[in-house]
């Protein structure tokens, strides 16, 4: 035992200050590399690499609970329900108020040199167009066969050329749609092309309507012609809204809603025309009709949206916002109407917590994408882009929102685990929004705000500490050598004390035999 102590003491005395400099410098370099990798991994994937590896691989080896095995039948059912809800809420939806690609998105690109749409977003639109505008019987009509290939083209010029080629054969509704969406440089030009599309589409619809019961092929053709007709009428209504003919737009949207209900339109959930109707009615300040539409669509059995929740909050805020004062409310308490308005705001913020920063202009807006993720940043941008003017028009509404929206988070301290009025906030929104939004010039809003993982803080502290030791050792080698020896001696002192106690208790012969073993 004493021989080991003497050899250790001799080893420590032979170490030079250069050794300590090299040791601390190497430690600082390694911890710095780990810190850089951990930070990069966290910025890209939103989690710590070390924590992920420890949970995924080391925890099962150390006898941790297998998350795949439920503890009870109730837990299993709850997890299944939560999983189904998560999948549903992470579904990407078509933006009901999406802009025109040629007349609006492309104009933005010409002016700024920036691309407002991501490849992922445009690819989803291409899939939508194939779903809406093609069917298995397209080969029976030459123009439709050309357009079937056109919707699959990635090159915009190739799509436009194919549409012109189809129009040389006959008046093709889907060809007019493509030109109105992508070639028209103004809304007026797009409206003119959509009117031509409506004329051609109405002829095809009436023809297929008479033949729809003659077989599955004709039924599929009629379904496609119905999709085309509804799409054209919806875009014509949006053209009227953009050109200032709002009452005309409202009438067209109401007719579309009735048409959908009568024909049991299968793509109602994809178009969400009632959201276009709500925005137009708000522009007319026809709040009674807005309330009537909300009464029909703000139902527990129907999927919610930021438009539904925040419009309901706006209507309730409108009743009290002009006289609302936070100082007076703190003195006398909230009235029933004010309480209802605050609860409606809390409900809306819980559904989509990203919207208030855009409405309060705490964060800059960009052009909305063609697809949105409900409860995500993309939906918040799409809502605020069109509805900010309506909130500004209601006196005091933004002030009430500013005073009350952050109170929502006190009711849901753990939003990823448990919600108050809605299901827990889905964790998939950030990843999907980064695909939908142009992150080159837009910082994606993340909720809840992520804390830095422990291992990033730990490696940052370790790197800083070892770097400081290396610097001090280089500047004061003698003093740091004495400090290192004293530190190691102090570190080994408890071990030496224990060994001395063991030697005093055990017989010398037994200790001699143990050391030999």
Image (cartoon, rainbow, N blue to C red):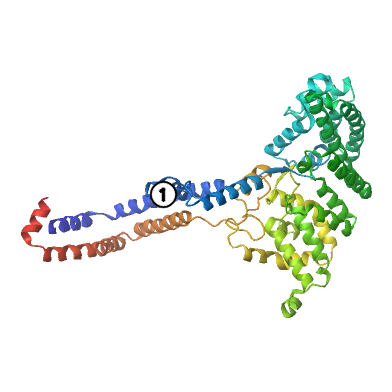
Q: Position of residue 368 (x, y in %)?
A: 75, 46
- Residue at (68, 48) in percent of width and height: 442
Count of number-bearing discs: 1
Q: Is residue 141 above or below residue 209?
A: above
Q: Quadrant of residue 316?
A: bottom right
Q: Is residue 238 visible?
A: no
Q: State whether residue 3 is above or below residue 330.
A: above
Residue situated in front as seen by the camera: 497 or 409: 409
For the residue pair 208 and 380, the one nearer the viewer reads as 208
Q: Which residue is mark 1?
A: 59
At 37% across and 56% down in the image, what residue appears?
470
Q: Position of residue 509 (x, y in %)?
A: 5, 58
Q: Image point 82% across, 41% down: which residue? A: 104
Where in the figure is residue 386, as x and y percent of width and height? 81, 51
Q: Is residue 170 visible?
A: yes
Pointer 1: residues within 10 angstroms few (<14), some, or many (20+)? few
Residue 17's image quarter?
Answer: bottom left
Q: Quadrant of residue 390?
A: bottom right
Q: Quadrant of the N terminus?
A: bottom left
Looking at the rendered structure, the secondary structure element under dot 1 is helix
């Amino acid at each position: 035992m004493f021989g080991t102590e003497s050899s250790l003491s001799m080893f420590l005395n032979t170490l030079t200050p250069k050794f300590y400099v090299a040791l601390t410098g190497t430690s600082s370099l390694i911890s710095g590399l780990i810190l850089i990798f951990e930070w990069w991994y966290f910025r890209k994937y939103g989690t710590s690499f070390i924590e992920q590896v420890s949970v995924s691989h080391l925890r099962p080896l150390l006898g941790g609970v297998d998350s795949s095995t439920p503890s009870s039948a109730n837990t299993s059912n709850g997890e299944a329900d939560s999983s189904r809800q998560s999948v549903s809420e992470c579904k990407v939806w078509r933006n009901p108020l999406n802009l025109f690609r040629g007349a609006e998105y492309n104009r933005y690109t010409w002016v700024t040199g920036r691309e407002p749409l991501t490849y992922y977003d445009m690819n989803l639109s291409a899939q939508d167009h194939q779903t809406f505008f093609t069917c298995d019987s397209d080969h029976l009509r030459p123009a439709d066969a050309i357009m079937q290939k056109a919707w699959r083209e990635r090159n915009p010029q190739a799509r436009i050329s194919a549409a012109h080629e189809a129009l040389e054969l006959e008046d093709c509704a889907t060809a007019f749609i493509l030109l109105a969406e992508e070639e028209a440089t103004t809304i007026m030009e797009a409206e003119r092309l959509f009117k031509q599309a409506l004329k051609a589409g109405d002829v095809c619809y009436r023809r297929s309507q008479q033949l729809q019961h003659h077989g599955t092929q004709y039924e599929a053709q009629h379904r496609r012609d119905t999709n085309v007709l509804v799409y054209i009428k919806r875009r014509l209504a949006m053209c009227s809204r953009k050109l200032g003919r709002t009452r005309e737009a409202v009438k067209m949207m109401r007719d579309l809603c009735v048409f959908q209900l009568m024909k049991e339109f299968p793509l109602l959930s994809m178009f969400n025309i009632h959201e276009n109707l709500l925005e137009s009615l708000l522009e007319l300040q026809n709040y009674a009709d807005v309330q009537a539409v909300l009464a029909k669509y703000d139902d527990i059995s129907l999927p919610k949206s930021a438009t539904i929740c925040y419009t309901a909050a706006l209507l309730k805020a409108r009743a009290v916002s002009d006289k609302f004062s936070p100082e007076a409310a703190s003195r006398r308490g909230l009235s029933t109407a004010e309480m209802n308005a605050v609860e409606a705001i809390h409900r809306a913020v819980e559904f989509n917590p990203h919207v208030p920063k855009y409405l309060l202009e705490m964060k800059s807006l960009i052009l909305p994408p063609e697809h949105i993720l409900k409860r995500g940043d993309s939906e918040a941008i799409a809502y605020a882009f069109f509805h900010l003017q309506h909130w500004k028009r209601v006196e005091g509404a933004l002030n009430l929102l500013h005073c009350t929206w952050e109170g929502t988070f006190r009711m849901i301290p753990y939003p990823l685990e448990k919600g108050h009025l809605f299901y827990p906030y889905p964790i998939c929104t950030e990843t999907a929004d980064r695909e939908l939004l142009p992150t080159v010039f837009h910082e994606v809003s993340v909720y809840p705000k992520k804390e830095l993982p422990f291992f990033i803080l730990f490696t940052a502290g370790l790197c800083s500490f070892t770097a400081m030791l290396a610097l001090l050792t280089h500047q004061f080698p003698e003093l740091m050598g004495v400090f290192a020896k004293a530190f190691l001696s102090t570190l080994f002192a408890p071990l030496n004390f224990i060994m001395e106690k063991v030697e005093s208790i055990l017989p010398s012969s037994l200790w001699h035999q143990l050391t030999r073993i």
